[in-house]
Image (tube, helix red, strand yellow):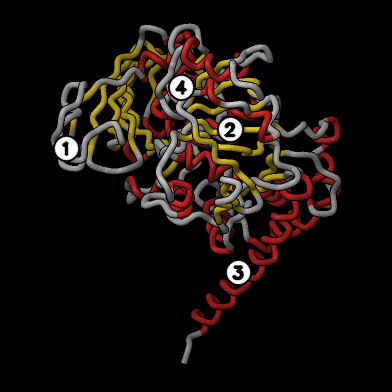
Amino acid sequence: MTSQHEEMYQKSWQERQDFAERMQPIIGQLYRNFGVEVSVYGRPLVNASAIDIIKAHKYVGTHEETKLRLRESFPFVEALSKMDLRPASIDVGKLAYRYLFQGEANDLTIEQYLQKELSPLKEQAAPAPKDVVLYGFGRIGRILARLLIERTGPMANLRLRAIVIRPGKDGDLEKRASLLRRDSIHGAFNGSISVDEDQGAIRANGAYIKVIYAKSPSEIDYTQYGIEDALVVDNTGIWTDEDGLGQHLQSKGVGKVLLTAPGKGDIKNIVYGVNQDMILDEDKIVSAASCTTNAITPVLKALNDKYGIKNGHVETVHSYTNDQNLIDNYHKSERRGRSAPLNMVITSTGAAKAVAKALPELKGLLTGNAIRVPTPNVSMAIMNLNLKTATDREALNDYLRGVSLESPLREQVDYTASTEIVSTDLVGSRFAGVVDSQATIVEDDRAVLYVWYDNEFGYSCQVVKVMHKMAGVTFQNLPKA
């Protein structure tokens, strides 16, 4: 015989599931019909399961004094479906919370309130779609493919048209599709993938992706595949300077090039959220910097804006990569030849110095080093900083919590107060970095911060944002901070 408490809990859970399941088709239609990406306190709901939607609402309670229930947010989602919208990222959780608990209603109905808060969208025209080519199909290339495919539809602004890989043997196409379909770290692809052997293409969730085999960019004429003015995302790491990357611009059908590694020379290294405004229409080659630079720069900017940074050291505890060896073997770099799954390996990183390319005010103030560790994904940056202004642990953590919720850096900086979180919990994080507040140490003007980051997925999300900027696609992020 069930107790009254059990019955109440079961009834509550069933109610949450019901509202989450009712939200799912509306959220999907909002994206497909209007290009609107719905989230709850930064947690994306497009293609989310009912359980993911419930968990996103539960997350609100970790940052606010009052819970946000699904029955409270559902009327806002429903009202959005009846509005004439433009492509945007709309945080329905924040809209609902402000309306219900922070006195922003001013006697307005939900519909009137949404019209007021979303009024900036009326002046925004829908941007033209941009053809995208992934040059290379390794770890970052396949995650970028997943991110682009999950946004496939008539309102998609970035359309993945082709991937370019080196010539392979018979069965290569199916193997490439299989690697996209299954991933040991990030799990199964959310959708359907099939191969068109006759046309040399991969079909995935409505996206038709041509697979082009070539040894160099000079061999390719993209226009013969109907690809024009494409943004080529070079994720091979083979070329990192203008001469090498400039080869792509010689191919017919290419408009611009984005490098998913630190760029050399005068190439602009962009950390989205910090210096994306440096990208000009005339820029043909841009770098999205490194995963570590993307993880630490937004947090460093936030701290420098508030407290000022005199100097500091950044130590990266980084998961091993394909550049290392499974077992001891020759490697041109020191120590990296030793078995990656068996050893912690001290190596160098240019991330600390690279911060200055995105944040010039910190030039010469930071040193850095790295330790490669026997985990396949998710890394951590430990930032030991001397600040210009003294503070305490509670104040600094509270500030960074606010940055993660209500600042222009809220899409880059996440925040956790969990005392139990470990690296695997961060697999799939879409943020550039996650501040582990429970590990923060502060004594007067000295602070030590621990920032987690999914060096594959979180970084790829940053790359996609740079892609949007290069393609001239800008999204309103509403409500305003």
Q: Are marks 3 and 4 in contact (CB under 8 Å)?
A: no
| Disc 1/disc 3 C-alpha distance (Å) | 47 Å
Distance from the alpha carbon under mark 3 to that under mark 2: 39 Å
Q: Secondary structure at mark 3?
A: helix
Element on which disc 4 rests: loop
Is residue 234 shown above or below 41?
above
Residue topped by disc 4: 289
Disc sitting over residue 17 in the figure = 3
Question: Tag 1, which secondary structure?
Answer: loop
Image x and y of residue 227, in percent: 68, 32
**Quarter of the figure with residue 57:** bottom right
Q: What residue is rendered at 64% in x and 22% in y?
A: 252
Q: Answer with the quarter of the image where residue 253 lies.
A: top right
Coordinates of residue 145 in the picture (x, y in percent): 54, 42
Asked whether the residues under the numbered discs 3 and 2 touch, taking CB atoms below 8 Å apart as contact, a structural biologist would say no
Q: CA distance from mark 1 to mark 2?
A: 34 Å
- Please say whether residue 403 is visible from this viewpoint: no
Disc 2 packing (10 Å; few <14; some 14–19; many ≥20): many
Mark nearer the viewer, 3 or 4: 4
Q: Is residue 323 left or right of 92 when viewed as pictured?
A: left
